[in-house]
Amino acid sequence: MLSIPKMRVILAVAGLCLAAAWPALADHKHGATKIQVATPWVRASIGQAPNTAAYMLISNMGTKADKLVAGATPVAKKVEIHEHVMDGNIARMREVSGIPVAAGVTAALKPGGYHVMIMGLKQPLKDGDTMPLTLTFETAGEITLEVPVMKKAPKGMTDMKMDHKGMGGHKH
Ligand SMILES: [Cu+2]
């Protein structure tokens, strides 16, 4: 059973950490958790395609486990946390309740794996633009980043073009 995604409206509140653009790190400290987000990027949308995906490395430098549970951006109607699973040789996406980031661990969000799904774009995302993205962590709270829009994965990151058209496996 897929959980029904809750629409989360995340208001900008005082105390948000505004991250510098990639490759700077978004450094966030909240009690026992310390979350760092590195090399965020979001794939440029194709034509009028309503959906795209964002990727990044999330490191937990703290001593307590944390979990990425939600996201929001002003440029799209909805943000979901997804993973890719292979169904035979067809890659499908499905929503997950979150991405666990244990203490001392770096979770990789990358093409073909976990990603932050940007759904219902209000306008196309073009190569070279940036997209504000607020991530909500169970313990660390909210982290807001400016995510560079890129046509292809940055150097050093394996790319894998996903067909987001069919939204295979998605039932909302
Ligand atoms: Cu997805």
Image (cartoon, rainbow, N blue to C red):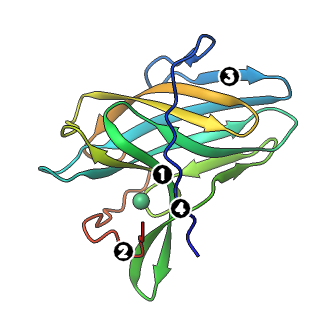
Q: Reading the chain from its start, which is encountered first: label 3 or label 4?
A: 4
The residue that label 1 is drawn on is: 80
Residue flagged by tag 2: what amino acid is it?
Gly
**Residue at point 30%, 35% (across, down):** 149
Residue flagged by tag 1: what amino acid is it?
Glu
Q: Reading the chain from its start, which is encountered first: label 1 or label 3?
A: 3
Mark pair 3, 4: CA separation? 29 Å
Mark 1 lies within 8 Å of ligand 1 (Cβ measured): yes
Mark pair 1, 3: CA separation? 22 Å
Give the mark toward the camera: 3 or 2.
Answer: 2
Visible residue check, residue 154: no
Q: Is residue 33 above or below residue 169?
A: above
Query: Could you tell whether 129 is left or right of 25 in the image?
Result: left
Query: Could you tell whether 102 is left or right of 70 in the image?
Result: right
Give the mark toward the camera: 3 or 4.
Answer: 4
Give the mark toward the camera: 1 or 4.
Answer: 4
Residue 62 picture location, percent across and down: 82, 32
Give the mark toward the camera: 4 or 2.
Answer: 4
The residue that label 3 is drawn on is: 28
**Residue at point 63%, 53% (across, down):** 98
The residue that label 4 is drawn on is: 4
Query: Could you tell whether 15 is left or right of 119 in the image?
Result: right
